[in-house]
Amino acid sequence: MILWIFISFSAATFQTVRFMLQKLLATVTLTPAGATFSRFFYSAPFVWLGLGLYLIGSGRAFPDLTIEFWIYALVGGLFQILGTICVVSLFKQRNFAVGITFMKTEVIQTALVGLVLLGDQINLGGWCAIFAGVVAVLILSKPPKVEGVWWQHLGSLASVIGLGSGAFLGISAVSYRAAALTLGTEDAAFRAAVTLGCVVALQVVLMLVWLVLRDRQEIIRVWQARSIAVWVGLTSLAGSFCWFWAFALQNAAYVKAVGQVELILAMAASVLFFHETISRRELWGMGLLCLSILGLILSI
């Protein structure tokens, strides 16, 4: 049981670094679509290289992939593209924190999608812990320079993008779990690697076709930004593999709930690297989030 928790923490850590790099690309060099494409384009070679070396070293054969697997992989990959574009678009919004607040409702949306599509059950203690985590996120994410409480910003563009990204990423997470579960092997890490490899290949093709049709110059800009974008690819590879591995082991809603620790990591980076201060409200929010994660772990 403990393994998936550590994997989820690792995924959140890598994702924090990736979003920092993507923010730099999106605000300085690339469009949201270009920053999203760079994530998949630069991670795909490493994904397939690692998977190929593992297959050669272990002597294992590539598993048979069913139509059901490809449907779930395609749905998950497409919705992850949409969700990532929404998240990167938030970096250009003045009220970024408001959008992130609503994006973090992803964990509840993931729980509902998992219940409908896969019948994943969550006990009462799990639901209480999840809701406590969402409250903590709302406390942490309220921007200090935006007047009013969070629900007063429901109609803002950032809020709509944030809620949309949460919904898209929730559907994506459940779809990836469904795809991994169609593979017969008991090795969760192998299932995660195969699913990740197939999904990334689909995402590169989908986004390449889109950019060729809509903005060919952006492809050139992605290549020109490779000195930073390649690190986006590497952190994306590490983070995505950890997410996929955790999804193969545990209910996606539980995984995403533990992944809320990403917000604390982001605030720690803010203090340690940018020498910013943390308010009393933010300390209360971090404490509640830690209790939420602990309560979730104890409820399983």
Image (cartoon, rainbow, N blue to C red):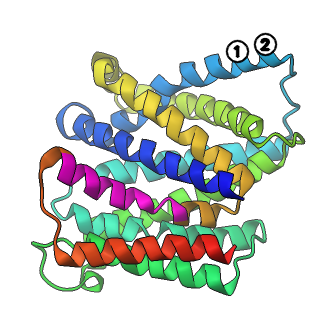
Query: Which residue position holds label 1?
Result: 53
Magenta span: chief secondary structure? helix
For this view, does 276 lie left or right of residue 52? left
Question: On the picture, is 298 further left or further right than 286?
Answer: right
Q: Nearer the viewer, residue 236 or 297?
A: 297
Secondary structure under tag 1 reads helix
Which residue: 34% across, 29% down?
Answer: 215
Residue 155 showing in the rendered view: no
Magenta span contains residue 159: no
Between 75 and 121, the one nearer to me in the picture? 121
> Within the image, what quadrant is residue 110 found in?
bottom right
Q: Residue at x 44, y 76 (%)?
A: 134
For the point 39% across and 78% down, the residue is: 288
Look at the image and give the residue range highlighted in magenta. 258-272
Q: Is residue 25 above or below residue 146?
A: above
Determine contact: label 2, label 1, CB under 8 Å: yes
| Residue 22 place in picture, x, y as percent | 31, 39
